Amino acid sequence: MSGKFELKRAANGEFHFTLLAESGQVILSSETYKARASAQNGIESVRKNSAEDHRFERKTSTSGRPYFVLKARNGEIIGQSQMFSSGDQMEAGIAAVKHDAPAASVSDLSH
């Protein structure tokens, strides 16, 4: 089994997606989008940009915990990770996105 994207509708009617690892753990979450098509475009952008390491920006939260964001070619953030307890865990999360995103299926749960 490989990873999968889940496309969902938020309580406010907007759309967002998550990328789940093979284990079912969320490894990347998107912003919200007004239209389903925009969220679907965001998924395609994750697939394309996750192959390039320089698209991942490694960050540290105000509480000192590492996390990462994935940026599109235009510099916009298309996804963010959870907070990790170590830099090694963050790097493993990036590796999981690189591995799972390109061929991940899409489960549209937004209906």
Image (spheres, rainbow, N blue to C red):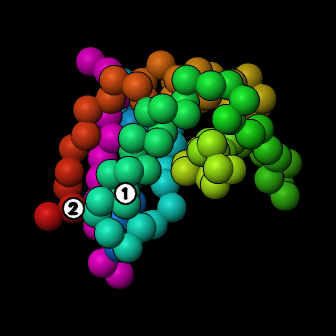
Say whether residue 47 is visible: yes
- Is 9 within the magenta? yes
* Few, some or many residues within 10 Å of mark 2 (<14, 14–19, 20+): some
Image: 101 above or below 12 = above
- Is 7 within the magenta? yes
Residue drawn where x is 30% and y is 47% of the image: 6
Determine which residue is flagged by label 2.
Answer: 110
On screen, residue 28 versus residue 15, left or right, reads right
Q: Quadrant of residue 3?
A: top left
Q: Of all residues shown, which one is farthest toward the left?
A: 111
Q: Quadrant of residue 53?
A: top right
Q: Of all residues shown, which one is farthest toward the bottom?
A: 12
* 98 or 88: nearer the viewer: 98
Q: Quadrant of residue 65?
A: top right
Looking at the figure, which quarter contains the N terminus?
top left
Determine which residue is flagged by label 1.
Answer: 39
Residue 103 lies, in percent from the top left, at: 34, 23
Say whether residue 23 is visible: no
Residue 23 lies, in percent from the top left, at: 37, 26
Identify the magenta region: 1-13
Spatial CA distance of label 2 from label 1 is 11 Å
Residue drawn where x is 48% and y is 39% of the image: 46
State the SS at label 1.
helix
* 35 or 106: nearer the viewer: 35
Which amino acid lies under the numbered mark 2 shown in the image of this protein?
A: Ser
Residue 108 lies, in percent from the top left, at: 20, 51
On screen, residue 80 versus residue 97, left or right, reads right
On screen, residue 21 versus residue 105, left or right, reads right
Residue 37 lies, in percent from the top left, at: 29, 59
Residue drawn where x is 49% and y is 50% of the image: 29
